[in-house]
Amino acid sequence: MSPDGLRPLGPFALPGPVSVVPGVVHLPGWLGSEERQQMFDRCQAWSEASGGPQSPRMRSGAPMSVGMVGLGWHWFPYRYSRTRDDGDGGRALAFPAWLGDLATSAVADAWGVDADVCQGTDGPASFDPDVALINWYGPEAKMGMHADSQEVSPAPVVSFSVGRPAVFRFGNSESRGRPWVDIILGSGDVVVFGGPARRAFHGVPRLLDGTDDPLVDGGAGRLNVTVRQTGLDG
């Protein structure tokens, strides 16, 4: 550990795939430059088609600091809907097959590092994602500690990062407090978590200065896309 509690890394990433804790795999630089560009371009188009990213309001009434767009399902605290119920009421955009295929490939690679990511499922071949949440981070945006608990399916979550590096904090399943581990996610990094870590609390306490990829807001922002299998009907 470095003095600030971060895992010791290279410029913005670990040198290779690593199991951070059981059920959590970090795949540094997994997205190549063309894939990052495609991810950014598609997310921009989807955001425009849905009327722009929305900042969901928490139960306290305070808005989240990230802008969000849903594909397949619309998420708002704390449930899924096929329509943007807390926005313009329009139907959520379709979940694209190519994004599902990309996420499935990431699950297969993560499973090769730590089979716990697919614990409770029939492995990568059974992964059938149906929702993506696109999160746009400005320079000061962050994501509080939370657990992805609205999905019925135990299938893993796949998280893609593009743009400015961020601190990703992965905690435990009991509370938002310690123990946790902090890792730095650079542009193109992917995190897959499932099995014993599927319902653990996690968040992004801050973005870091500097960037290795100026795609998002000229290097000032971050794009995060999480792909999930809800197991929901409708």
Image (cartoon, rainbow, N blue to C red):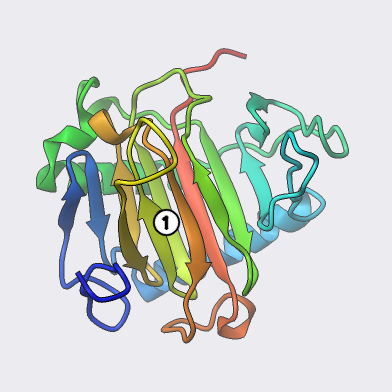
Using the image as rendered, state which of residue 80 and residue 202 is in the foreground. Answer: 202
Q: Quadrant of residue 153?
A: top left
Most extreme residue toward the top is 233
- Residues packed near mark 1 inside 10 Å, few (<14), some (14 to 19) or many (20 plus): many
Q: Judge from the rendering whether residue 125 lies leftward or rightward of residue 44; answer left or right.
A: left
| Position above or below: 211 against 178 | below
Residue 124 visible to the viewer: no
Position in image of residue 137 (x %, y %) = 61, 64
Q: Is residue 220 above or below residue 58?
A: below
In percent of width and height, residue 66 lies at 66, 57
Look at 55% across and 78% down and name the residue there: 215
What secondary structure is marked by label 1? Answer: strand
Residue, disc 1 = 160
Name which residue type carries label 1: Phe
- Identity of the residue drawn at 62% across and 61% down: 136
Q: Is residue 8 above or below residue 96?
A: below
Residue 41 visible somewhere in the drawing: yes
> Image quadrant for the C terminus?
top right
Q: Could you say where residue 15 lies in the image, as x and y percent from the top left?
A: 16, 73
Side of 210 relative to 19 (left or right): right
